[in-house]
């Protein structure tokens, strides 16, 4: 497949893993790219990104910056052009920090996000998971809490039968609300669940 990372011609929920190495800093719209990565991942799929990053150690950063500034000169001598190497250095310097990339990943749906620095932060591996089922279950739980006193859960369950474990949980939420109203010191659902 030859396509842009912003528009992958594949179905939703297709892959267990989505990896990108030293490429996300070159896309035209990182938010669209992350949304697209999220879209093509299966539920509980993992996104992993290896990319140049920011160095926190002052001495290592100083040495790395000096080395980086020499790359365009070396490139011009060997390849005959310094433009690709100037672009490389500028794109690295202008790219997000480790924490900023984490925030972008979270904003675009990924959860359980973390990163690990490599070589003191010259590069970093970012990882995040597609946990969309959890979002839907949490929304159902919130809805169940709202509807628990009205008897609407039984109506919903008649229309859309739930697996036994979820049905039991919703009944516990429903019963828990009643228990809490009767016995203020108890945790909701404590008597039945």
Image (spheres, helix red, strand yellow):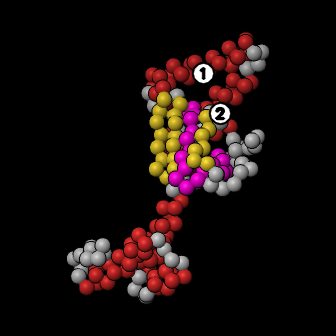
Residue in the image at 55% along x and 55% along y? 43
Secondary structure type for disc 1:
helix
Q: Which residues are magenta?
A: 30-53
Along the line of sight, the residue nearer the viewer: 176 or 27? 176
Q: Is residue 48 magenta?
A: yes
Measuring 48% from the left and 47% from the top, which residue is drawn there?
113
Mark 1 is surrounded, within 10 Å at the Cα level, by few (under 14), some (14 to 19) or many (20 or more) other residues, namely: some
For label 2, count other residues whose C-alpha is less than 10 Å away and answer few (under 14), some (14-19) or many (20+): some
Estimate the x, y position of residue 174 in percent, counting from the top left: 37, 80
| Residue 106 appears in view | no
**Lateral position of residue 57 relative to residue 79, left or right:** left
Can residue 68 be seen in this snapshot?
Answer: yes
| Picture residue at 57% right of the left edge, 39% below the top | 49
Location of mark 2 (residue): 91
Q: Look at mark 1 in the image and give the residue it sits on.
A: 68
- Asked whether, in this view, residue 2 is left or right of residue 187, the answer is right
Residue depicted at x 75% and y 15%: 79
Q: Please say if 31 is above or below 161.
A: above
Q: Is residue 190 magenta?
A: no
Quadrant of image for the C terminus: bottom left
For the residues marked 1 and 2, what is the alpha-carbon distance in whole angstroms?
Answer: 12 Å
x and y percentages locating residue 159 in the rendered image: 54, 82
Q: Is residue 57 left or right of residue 190?
A: right
Left or right? Give the position of 36 relative to 159. right
Q: Is residue 34 above or below residue 49?
A: below
Q: Residue furthest top?
A: 77
Rendered position, 122 above or below 113: above
């Amino acid at each position: 497949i030859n396509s842009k990372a912003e528009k992958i011609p594949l179905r939703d929920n297709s892959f267990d893993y989505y990896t990108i190495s030293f490429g996300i800093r070159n896309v035209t719209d990182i938010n669209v790219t992350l949304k697209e990565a999220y879209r093509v991942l299966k539920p509980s799929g993992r996104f992993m990104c290896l990319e140049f990053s920011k160095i926190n150690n002052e001495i290592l950063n100083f040495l790395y910056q000096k080395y980086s500034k020499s790359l365009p000169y070396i490139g011009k001598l060997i390849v005959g052009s310094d433009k690709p190497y100037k672009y490389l250095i500028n794109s690295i310097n202008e790219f997000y920090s480790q924490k900023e990339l984490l925030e972008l990943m979270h904003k675009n749906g990924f959860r359980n996000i973390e990163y690990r620095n490599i070589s003191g932060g010259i590069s970093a591996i970012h990882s995040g998971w597609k946990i969309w089922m959890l979002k839907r279950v949490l929304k159902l739980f919130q809805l169940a809490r709202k509807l628990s006193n009205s008897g609407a859960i039984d109506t919903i369950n008649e229309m859309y039968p739930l697996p036994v474990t979820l049905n039991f949980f919703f009944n516990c939420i429903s019963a828990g609300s009643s228990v809490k109203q009767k016995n203020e010191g108890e945790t909701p659902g404590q008597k039945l669940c």
